[in-house]
Image (cartoon, helix red, strand yellow):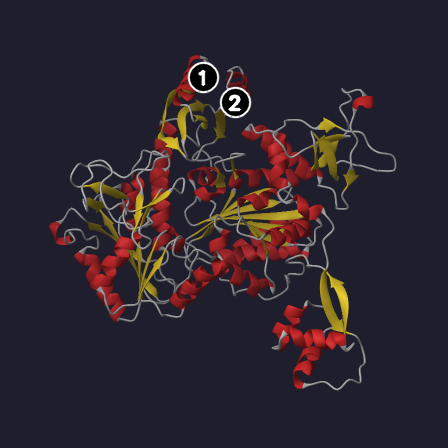
Amino acid sequence: MAVLVPYPVDKAYDYGVPDGVDLEAGDYVIVPLGGREVTAVVWGDAAGDVNPKKLKNVVMKHQAKPMPKVMRDFVDWVAEYTMSPKGFVLKMALSVPGALAPPKPAKGYRVAGETKVKLSEKQQKVVDALSDGIARIAAEIARDAGVSAGVVKTLAGKGVLEEVDIFNPAPCKKPDPFRDGAALSEDQDSVAQTLKVAVKSGEFHASLLDGVTGAGKTEVYFEAVAQALKQGQQVLILLPEIALSNAFLDRFQSRFGCAPALWHSHLSTGARKTTWRGVAEGHSKVVVGARSALFLPYQDLGLIIVDEEHEPAYKQEDGVIYNARDMAVVRAKLGAFPICLVSATPSLETIHNAWPKPLGNARYEHLHLTDRFGGARMPEIESIDMRDKEHKPEAQHFISPTLKSAIVETVERGEQVLLFLNRRGYAPLTLCRSCGHRMECPRCTAWLVEHKSRGCLQCHHCGFAARSPKECPECSEADSFVVCGPGVERIYEEARAYFPDANILLMASDTAENNDQLRKMLQEIKDDKIDIIIGTQIIAKGHHFPNLTLVGVIDADLGLTGGELRAAERCYQLLHQVAGRAGREEKKGRVMLQTFMPEHRIMQALADGARDPFLETEAAEREAAHMPPYSRLVGIIVSGRDEGQVMEISKELGRTAPQSEGVMILGPAPAPFARLRGKFRYRLLVQADKNLNIQKTIEHWVGAVKCPSTVRIYIDIDPQSFL
C-alpha cells in the first residue's frame, strides 16, 4: 500500500502489508521511517516501483475510522496550491497522533445498588448527586455534592459506591437543534431561510452574509447550523481569535444546550486528543476553532461558517502558508456542501465574488442585513481634525480637548466610554535625547516597544525583551531616554490623570493573558463596574456592551502607513468594527476619530456610512494597478543567517526569472523587515494574470536554482502581508 507520512515529503511511499492485516485507503497506521516508527495514513494502492522483497512492512493499524477520501483529496489540493510538500499538509491533519491510541480510562464511581448502610448528611448528598446513574470521577462528584473527595472514597470503601472505568466523552456530542433560538426580524428570518435551503440541498453553495455591526448575523447563521445538525451532519465555525470569543461561546451554549468542541492552540494536550478523536469518529457535531480546525478529519462535514472572514488572522504565515478562508471554500466545494462567509466589512476579494457582473463575478450569493437588531441605530461618526489648534492636546498628551469633553459628558450620564488605540505597550519608540540613539531589536529590523508596567523594552515580532537601561548604550549618558508616541499604557496613564474618579480598565493581550482573566474583565464591563475602557483590537470586535455609547479612536491614521496593498481596506475594517461597539441597544452611540487627515476617503466613508462607494473606489484602483482580486500575486522570501548567501540566492532568482507573457517579477529587494528573528530576508513579488497556472511556472523557476541548506526559500501564494 502507498502510505503518506507527516514529514516534508511530496509523495506516498510503498509499504508491505503483514499477513492477517486488512488495509484500505484512509486507514491510520504506524510505519517504520528511518530509525523511527511514525503515525501515517494509507493513501492508496502501491505504486509498484520498488522490489516487493525490499519493502518494509506496516507495523500496525490503528483502530479508528479511516480518514475520509474528501479529506485526503483536500490535503492533496492544498499541497498543490500552496506548493507545500504533501506530508507537511498531512501533518496539520495529524496534529495529535496520540489521539489514535486507545484512550486511557479514569477511575469513576456510581451507586452500587440498594444499601442498608446508614448515611450521614454529606454521604447522602453524594448518593443524591449520582442519582442519574452516570459514573463520574471523585472530584466531579465532590464538587456537585458540595463535599470533599474523601467522602466519596469512604462510600466506595463501604460498598455504597462501585468503581468503574470511565472515558472522557467527545465534546459537543448531543447539541439540541430543536431549542428555540432568538426571535428573528423579518429580514433576518428571510436570510436564515435561504441558508437553511442551501444546507438542505446537499450541494456546494457559497454565500456572503453581509450585515452591519449588531445586525444579529450570529443568530441568523445559527439557524443554518441547526438545520445541519437536524440532518445528522457536522458543522465547523471558524473564528479568527477563538481564545477571545467568550461571548460567542455563551451564545452557542444558550442556543444549543451544550458547549461546542473547541480547537485552538491554547488547548491542553488532553483536550486536543479528546476533540480530535471526537471529530474523527463523527461524535463531536460542532467545532468552533481557529484556522487549523479546517484540517480536522471530519466524518460528515455538512456546513462551514467563516465568521469575520476579512480578518488577517486566517492567514498562516509559516510552515504551510495558506489562507483558511480560501481553503475553507475549497473544502466545501470538494465536500459538496454550503459555506457561509460572514462580515460587516467584507474583504475586497470576497465582495468581488459577491458583486453582480460586470462589477464582480457573482460566484457567491450576497445576503444582506442592513439594520441593527432590535431597532438600535448606527452610531454617529465624526472626525476630529488634530491639525486644528482648537483640538490640539497639551504637550505630551494625546486626548484632544473635544474628546475629553465628550468623555466627561458620557461618564456623567452613567454611560461607558471606549478609547481605542491599536498599539500595545507604553510607547513605540525610545531614543536618547543626547545622541539620538534608538533602542532597536538585536534580532529584527524593528524598534523596541517600552512596557512601563513591566519596566522592560520588548520586540513584538520575535519576543526579545530587555530591562529599560539607565544609561544610553551609545553615548553612556545617564537618564537621557525619552519615549516617542503613545501606546495604550500611556493613554491609560493620561486618562487616570484626567479622570481620577472614574473606574478605568486597560485591555490588551498583555493585560488579559489568559481566558479567565479576559472573561472577568468583560464581565466587569457588562456589569457597569467600568466607566472607561482603554484597549487594542482585543476589544474591537464581537463584544456587546449595552451601556457603551462613546468610542474615541486616539490615532485613526495608524493603519495608513507602510504602503501595504490592503492598508486602506484594513484601516477601514478595523475602524468600522471598533465604531460598531457604540450604541448597540436603545442608547444612541457616538464615535470620534482623532485624525490628521479628515479629508481622507476612509474618514469620509466612515462619517458618511458610505462603505460600498469606498469598496468600489478601492476596487477600481486595484483593477487599474492590476492587483488582486484582478490578478494573482505570489511572494517569494529568501531567508538565512548569512546575509551574503541570502543576497546571492536572491540575485540568482532575479537573473533566472521567467519572461512569460502575463507574468511580471518585481525584485529582489530587502524585505521591509530585512532581519527577522535573527535571519536576513529578501523578497521577490510575482504578479500574474488570473488565468495562468502560476504554481507550475514558479516550480520550474525556483526548482532550477541550487540553494544551500542554510538558506530557505518560502513561497507565499496570495500573500496578505508584504513585510
Alpha carbon of mark 2 to alpha carbon of mark 1: how far? 16 Å
Residue placed at 65% from the left, 73% from the top?
Answer: 149
**The disc labelled 2 sits on which kind of residue?**
Ser
Residue ID for mark 1: 653
State the mark number for residue 709. 2
Is residue 282 found left or right of 460 in the rendered image?
right
Give the quadrant of residue 139. Answer: bottom right
Q: Secondary structure at mark 1?
A: helix
For label 1, the crowd category at 10 Å Cα-Cα, with few meaning under 14, some 14 to 19 and many 20 or more, is many
Image coords of residue 182 (percent x, y):
53, 65
Image coords of residue 399 (percent x, y):
21, 55
**Location of residue 411 with respect to 306 vertically, above or below:** below
Judged by depth in the image, the label closer to the viewer, 2 or 1, is 2
Image coords of residue 255 (percent x, y):
57, 63
For label 2, the crowd category at 10 Å Cα-Cα, with few meaning under 14, some 14 to 19 and many 20 or more, is few
State the mark number for residue 293. none
Is residue 427 found left or right of 14 in the rendered image?
left
Image coords of residue 656 (percent x, y):
46, 13
> CB atoms at circles 2 and 1 under 8 Å apart?
no
Tell me the quarter of the image containing the N terminus. top right
Give the quadrant of residue 111. Answer: bottom right
Q: Earlier in the sequence, mark 2 or mark 1?
A: 1
Given residues 385 and 670, the one toward you in this image is 670
Residue placed at 23% from the left, 67% from the top?
Answer: 500
Tell me the quarter of the image containing the C terminus. top left
Q: Note whether residue 193 is visible.
A: yes
Most extreme residue toward the left, as rendered?
A: 389
Given residues 521 and 450, the one toward you in this image is 450
Q: Secondary structure at mark 2?
A: loop
Is residue 12 found left or right of 497 in the rendered image?
right
**The disc labelled 1 sits on which kind of residue?**
Leu
